[in-house]
Image: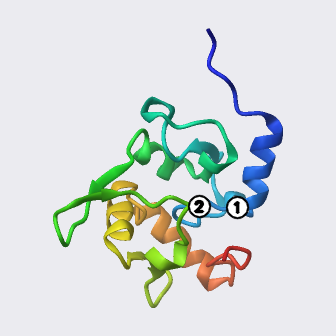
Amino acid sequence: MPEPKISIRQKRTVFDRAHECCEYCYSQQKYSSAPFAVEHIVPRAAGGTDTLANLALSCSGCNGHKFTRIRWIDIISGVEVPLFHPRNQQWHDHFEWSSDFTLLLGLTAIGRATVEALQMNRPGLVNLRRVLFQIGKHPPETVE
C-alpha cells in the first residue's frame, strides 16, 4: 500500500504558517540556495502522522541533520532530551541570538540539544546571517 502524501494544500499552509522561514534555525527561504522542505517533526518511522500538527518547514541543512531524530544529548547536562517541537513549543523559550545575531544559542536543554543535533550554527549559515544582518534582513521580521 503506498504511503500517504502531504497534499499541496498542506504544504502551502506549512510555508505560509512559517512565513517561509525554517522553523528550527529561522533561515529564510528567499536567501537560500537550496529548497526548503515540509518535514515530519515526529518521523513516520517513529509513528508521526501527515497532519499539520506534525509538519514543519525546514531548510535543507536542518532537515538533513534532523533526519529521523527526535532526541539528542544536551551538551551541559549530558542527558538525552527531546528535540525542539515547533508545534508544541515556542521558539523564543528555547533559543536566542548571540549579540551579533550570527549564532543561535540554546537557552534550555531542548534548545542546546537541537542546536547541536541540527548543527544550527553551520559555518555557511553563520556567514549568511552576518551578511543579512549587515543589510537589515536578519533576523526575519515576520517570525515570532
Density class for disc 2 (Cα within 10 Å; few <14, some 14-19, many ≥20) is: many
Q: Which quarter of the rendered picture does the N terminus lie within?
A: top right
Compare marks 2 and 1 and give the one earlier in the sequence.
1
- For residue 78, side relative to residue 124 (left or right): left
Residue type at numbered disc 2:
Glu
User: Circle 1: is it few (<14), some (14-19), or many (20+) Cα within 10 Å?
Assistant: many
Q: How is the image coloured?
A: rainbow
* Quarter assignment of residue 138: bottom right
Pointers 2 and 1 in contact (C-beta within 8 Å): yes
At horizontal 60% and vertical 82% (from top left) the residue drawn is 133
Task: Calculate the distance from the C-alpha at mark 2 to the C-alpha at mark 1.
Answer: 6 Å
| Image location of residue 143, percent across then percent down | 68, 73
Q: Amino acid at mark 1?
A: Ala
Q: Is residue 74 left or right of residue 107?
A: left
Q: Looking at the picture, how far across and down is residue 117, in whole percent?
A: 34, 55
* Residue beneath the point at 67% across and 83% down: 135
Image coordinates of residue 56 in percent, x first then y, are: 61, 51
Of 7 and 88, nearer the camera is 88
Residue at 53 percent across and 78 percent down: it is 92
Which label number is shown at residue 23?
A: 2
Q: Quadrant of residue 49?
A: top right
Closest to the observer, 136 or 141: 141
In the picture, the quarter occupied by the C terminus is: bottom right
In the rendered image, residue 95, in percent from the top left (x then y), is placed at 45, 76
Left or right position of 103 against 109: right
Q: Is residue 30 above or below residue 50?
A: below
User: Which residue does the image show at 50% across and 83% down from the upper left?
Assistant: 101
- Specify the label residue 60 is tagged with: none
Q: Which residue is mark 1?
A: 18
